[in-house]
Image (spheres, rainbow, N blue to C red):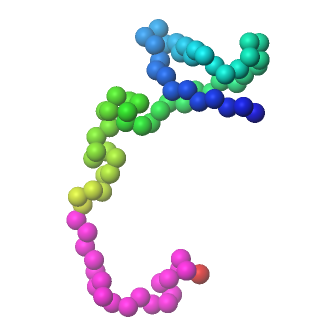
């Protein structure tokens, strides 16, 4: 399967036009359409706060110098 990726925008009449495809005339193709989630694709509407919701949130460490029990290291098992 030969894939070709193109980013475009929906026209005012709710259509999409894709030109200069690298396929032969009459060759069957499959078309999938996904909405872009990147801020540049949405016109920059996504703010920095939306991208990093925990940025600037205070962090509180409870007993940061206390040893960790072997049983608490579940990830290493």
Q: Percent x, y for residue 66? A: 33, 90
The residue shown at (30%, 83%) is 64
Q: Quadrant of the C terminus?
A: bottom right
User: Is 61 displayed left or right of 14 in the figure?
Assistant: left
Between 2 and 67, the residue placed more toward the observer is 2
User: Is 10 displayed left or right of 60 in the figure?
Assistant: right
Q: Percent x, y for residue 5? A: 59, 30
Residue stretch rendered in magenta on the structure: 58-76
User: Looking at the picture, does residue 69 appear above or below residue 21?
Assistant: below
User: Is 4 displayed left or right of 52 in the figure?
Assistant: right
Which residue, as the protein is rendered here, is positioned at the far top?
Answer: 13
Between 67 and 25, the residue placed more toward the observer is 25
Confirm whether the magenta stretch covers residue 53.
no
The residue shown at (38%, 30%) is 42
Q: Percent x, y for residue 2? A: 72, 31
User: Looking at the picture, does residue 49 appear above or below residue 45?
Assistant: below
Q: Taken as a whole, is the magenta stretch helix, strand or loop? A: loop
User: Looking at the picture, does residue 8 appear above or below residue 77?
Assistant: above
Confirm whether the magenta stretch covers residue 74.
yes
The residue shown at (53%, 15%) is 16
Between 24 and 8, the residue placed more toward the observer is 24
Q: Percent x, y for residue 6? A: 55, 26
Q: Quadrant of the N terminus?
A: top right
Count of marks placed on residues? 0
Res 43 → quadrant:
top left
User: Looking at the picture, does residue 66 appear above or below residue 13?
Assistant: below
User: Is 26 displayed left or right of 53 in the figure?
Assistant: right
The residue shown at (44%, 36%) is 37
Between 66 and 29, the residue placed more toward the observer is 29
């Amino acid at each position: 399967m030969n894939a070709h990726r193109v980013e475009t925008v929906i026209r005012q009449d709710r259509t999409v036009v894709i030109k200069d495809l690298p396929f032969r005339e009459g060759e069957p193709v499959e078309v999938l359409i996904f909405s872009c989630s990147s801020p540049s694709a949405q016109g920059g509407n996504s703010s920095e706060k939306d991208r990093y919701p925990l940025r600037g949130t205070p962090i509180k460490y409870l007993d940061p110098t206390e040893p960790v029990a072997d049983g608490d290291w579940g990830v290493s098992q």
